[in-house]
Image (cartoon, helix red, strand yellow):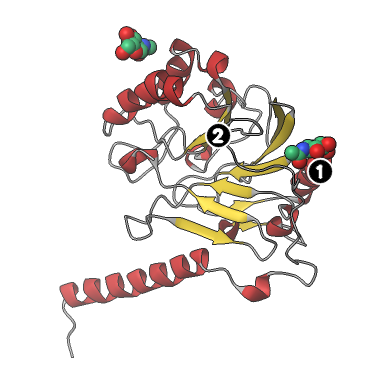
Amino acid sequence: MRISKLTLSLLILIIMLSMFAARISNLISISYDYASEDDQVIPRPYDPSLVLDDENKHLMWFVQISDIHLSIFHDSGRISDFNDFCNVTLDIIQPTVVLASGDLADAKAIDSMGSRQFIQEWHFYQDILQKNNVEKKTMWLDIRGNHDNFNVPSIMEEKSHFHQFSIQGKRHLRSYMYRVTKDQQTYSFIGVDACLDPGPRRPFNFIGLLKSEEYQTLENFERESRDSNGTVWFGHYPTSCIISPDPGIRNLMKNGVAYMCGHLHTLAGTVPKMYTLHRTGTLELELGDWKDNRL
Ligand SMILES: *[C@@H]1O[C@H](CO)[C@@H](O)[C@H](O)[C@H]1NC(C)=O
Ligand SMILES: *[C@@H]1O[C@H](CO)[C@@H](O)[C@H](O)[C@H]1NC(C)=O
């Protein structure tokens, strides 16, 4: 039997699509055997004298923006809308903290196939933050995503534009922690940088990795955060996309309120609200993207 070229291409396409679907369902499902024995739901302490009323005491709010993908080739509205976000939206919401959870720049070639860092995209990012005095308005916590790490030979090199042009990249090489005090309550924000080092080109850095020293750094942050009134974890990759040493990344976050991440966008509109509850009681909330959905 002769198989035509078209049939062959179709067959290959079907096989690739089913592999992709299996991969994705693997990524978003929470497998119960993933959790270890000591991953029990931890009762969260709360003060019973605190009741909701019409005052804004004991209240702190923050905003997350993710997968911005500022691009010099595609959809200039991403840039102008991001400027409005920093100018108008932040002035209205007045959040204590903004989490910018990675893929700040697109770093994709004009044909969308290859990848490369473009310094102009980072100039847009830096200029918008500076022009709008973002650092005076809020605590801006930006962290790298895989696109910010495409073709980046080393975090020490000039080529890591994230470390040259972002707000936190100038201060921290990888994961970091901040404490925020508002209205006598203290909150910890722990940023998880699971980017590969060196950063491979597209499409080879879809998955994140925590080396054991990075894991230890995060363990130390976790210990330090215990005396605060609430801990929020954030990063680019969902935990299902991070390879980490035992007892695993979810275990690390077990005293946290939530882990806020990005990376999967909305899976092309198929999963508009992506969230899960870890067995430890920590929420994992994956925000869709600014790139196409302005989320
Ligand atoms: C911010 O918005 C105001 C009012 O719409 C406008 O006058 C100003 O030029 C904007 N600033 C920037 C940096 O876009
Ligand atoms: C916040 O933490 C402090 C120190 O641990 C504690 O004294 C205080 O009661 C906590 N506040 C609330 C509202 O839980």
Query: Which residue is at the front of the view, 129 or 198?
Result: 129
Local packing at callout 2 (Cα closer than 10 Å; few below 14, some 14-19, many 20+) is few
Local packing at callout 1 (Cα closer than 10 Å; few below 14, some 14-19, many 20+) is some
Q: Quadrant of the N terminus?
A: bottom left
Q: What's under tag 1, amino acid-wise?
A: Arg
User: Is 94 on the left-hand or right-hand side of 209?
Assistant: left
Look at discs 2 and 1 and give the one toward the viewer: 2
Indicate the position of residue 85 as horizontal and vertical percent values.
Answer: 39, 25
Indicate the position of residue 16 as horizontal and vertical percent values.
Answer: 35, 70
Ligand 2 is found in the corner quadrant, namely: top right
Residue 54 circle label = 2
Indicate the position of residue 57 as horizontal and vertical percent values.
Answer: 64, 30
Which badge, 2 or 1, comes first in the chain's sequence?
2
Which residue ends up furthest to the bottom in the rendered image?
A: 1
Q: Pointer 1: what residue?
A: 226
Q: Quadrant of the C terminus?
A: top left
Query: Which residue is at the front of the view, 13 or 95?
Result: 95
